[in-house]
Image (cartoon, rainbow, N blue to C red):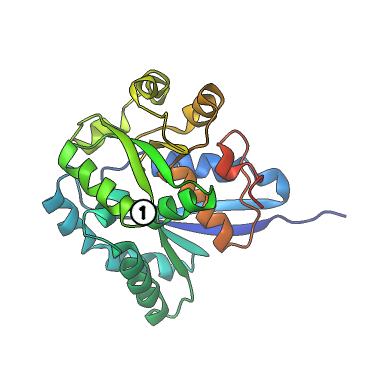
Amino acid sequence: MLVLAKNYRIGLIVPSSNTTMETEIPSMLQSREKNNESFTFHSSRMRMLHVTKEELAKMDVDSDRCAVELSDARCDVIAYACLVAIMSQGSGYHCLSEARLTGVAKENGADISVISSAGALIEGIHALGAKKVAIITPYMKPLTNMVIEYIEDNEIKVTDSISLEVSDNLEVGRLDPMNLLEVVKELDISNADAVVLSACVQMPSLPAIQKVEDMIGKPVLSAATSTVYQILNHLGLQPIVPNAGKLLSGSLN
């Protein structure tokens, strides 16, 4: 008997210059489609070109409009796909943002969970049981420091960090993910329980995640893999994606 695939609509709230979330998240979820699942992806964009605290704060105001637009499409889950826009707003902001945007969708008649890549990264680190992480970001150092403070406010110690210092968001999306195999060699991971290979949903890292994990022998995750982990959990699906690191290996359940 033919079994029709269950379709899930994934909403993405995305910075206008982001080119990575709409490639890495679909790639991970579509790799599961042999499980009688199918996914479609629906984006609403917030204007942002340069990754500065001021431009991020201005952009974040548009997230309410995006939540309304995506709730019009009755998406099954919505992901706010800009980690630093949330973390630069101060400690705990992902909880406030997620609750507000979920409320905005509900006011529009849609009972939809809204998650954030910022909250997802925190949850992903906790899911691994990691207390200490080393991170790589594309940001200028002041923004990286804000990310470190945010992570550490969630009872996770950041033992080392590398900032690639690329302020143009389009250029961040053009970085070669395979270069991370060399960049990570400069990261002090000796005291880390896990490595965040990309603390940014715009910096490509998916092709390198499993390779780096195999190379260093420690769990490796990213803002994008963490977001997929949360998407799958919110859909009530097993959070398993092949070759995407321990977080999505299925070994945590």
Compared across the picture, whether 227 is left or right of 164 comes to right
Counting from the top left corner in percent of width and height, residue 194 is at 47, 38
Disc 1 residue type (three-letter) = Ala
Q: Residue at x 28, y 57 (%)?
A: 86
Counting from the top left corner in percent of width and height, residue 143 is at 19, 44
User: Does residue 48 show up?
Assistant: yes
Q: Please give the count of numbered marks on the rendered protein.
A: 1
Up the image or down, 59 lies above or below 32; here it is below
Q: Residue at x 39, y 57 (%)?
A: 119
Please tell me which residue lies in front, 50 or 69: 50
Please tell me which residue lies in front, 169 or 251: 251
Counting from the top left corner in percent of width and height, residue 166 is at 20, 31
Q: Residue at x 38, y 18 (%)?
A: 182
Q: Quadrant of the N terminus?
A: bottom right
| Among the 4 quarters of the image, the one containing residue 183 | top left
| Among the 4 quarters of the image, the one containing residue 115 | bottom left
Up the image or down, 174 lies above or below 3; here it is above
Compared across the picture, whether 91 is left or right of 41 comes to left
- Name the residue carrying label 1: 118
Counting from the top left corner in percent of width and height, residue 209 is at 49, 31
User: Does residue 202 show up?
Assistant: no
Q: Circle 1 sits in a helix, a strand or a loop, which is it? A: helix
- Neighbours of disc 1 within 10 Å: few (<14), some (14-19), many (20+): many
Compared across the picture, whether 41 is left or right of 15 comes to right
